[in-house]
Amino acid sequence: MLKKYYKIFSVLCFFLLFCFNCTKFIYPQINISASKDADYNLKEILNKDGKINKIINGSFNTEGYKFEFDPITSEPVFSKISKNDSISIPRWSSVGGGADHMVKVITINGNDIYIGGRFKSVKNSNGTVVANTKHIAKWNGSSWSALGKRTNNTVSAIAVKGNDVYVGGAFTGVPVTDDSVDTNCRFIARWDGTNWPPLLKGVENEIIIKF
């Protein structure tokens, strides 16, 4: 009886080992690389339909190829890049001349981008410093502009609703003129497109957004 179970156990172990090795053979590790130091060129392991031959493993150079996913199997399907192909490579680009110090918050509303932070000014693409952009500014896709007379300290939160821009931060007021500050805009304020009307008397302490 014991010998019978021993034989069954041995056959089962052999079957599992066989299946494991077949899986390794059918689904080997494939490393797709753009490096010229790869083991093979991609064309050496492609089937006629542009899919990778699963029997082969190693690293392969994909230079000169593009790919898209099969809509049914989700496998990558490779094809040669032709002269008529327009290959777009995403790149970073500048936003005007940038800010001169830390940006703490970015809010997008339609085509407009609002930034707030510790910066003292922003520049347009031609290098011109935009006046009254200390701590807050708006980018319209081609140039920077100010929101009134700015705030007198760091802006760390921005929200937009309709034509109103709400800001919060460490500021204790917004300048009304070059010599006076509206201290009712303490730590929170609303820009209506023309002025900074106070939200009652503001709040008692700095507004901080934590992520």
Image (cartoon, helix red, strand yellow):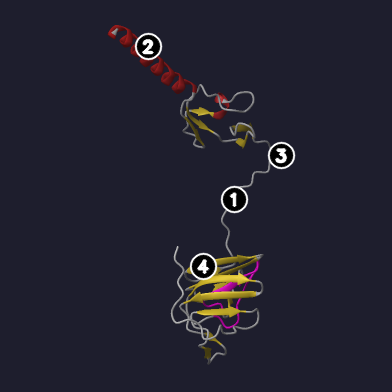
Earlier-in-chain disc, 1 versus 2: 2
Earlier-in-chain disc, 3 versus 1: 3
**What's the residue at 46%, 22% (across, down)?**
23
Q: Give the number of the disc on residue 105.
A: 4
> Residue 158: within the magenta?
no
Earlier-in-chain disc, 2 versus 3: 2
Residue 151 vs 89, above or below: the answer is below
Give the residue number, with chain letter if any, for mark 1: 90
C-alpha distance separating marks 4 and 2: 65 Å
Asked whether the beta carbons under mark 2 and mark 3 sit within 8 Å of each other, the answer is no
Q: Give the number of the disc on residue 84.
A: 3
Screen quadrant of the C terminus: bottom left
- Extreme residue toward the left, this view: 2
C-alpha distance separating marks 2 and 3: 59 Å
Left or right: 193 as drawn, with respect to 105: right
Q: Which residues are magenta?
A: 133-150
Is the magenta region chiefly helix, strand or loop?
Answer: loop
**What's the residue at 57%, 75% (across, down)?**
166
| Numbered disc 4: secondary structure | strand
Q: Residues within 10 Å of mark 3 (few under 14, many from 20)?
A: few
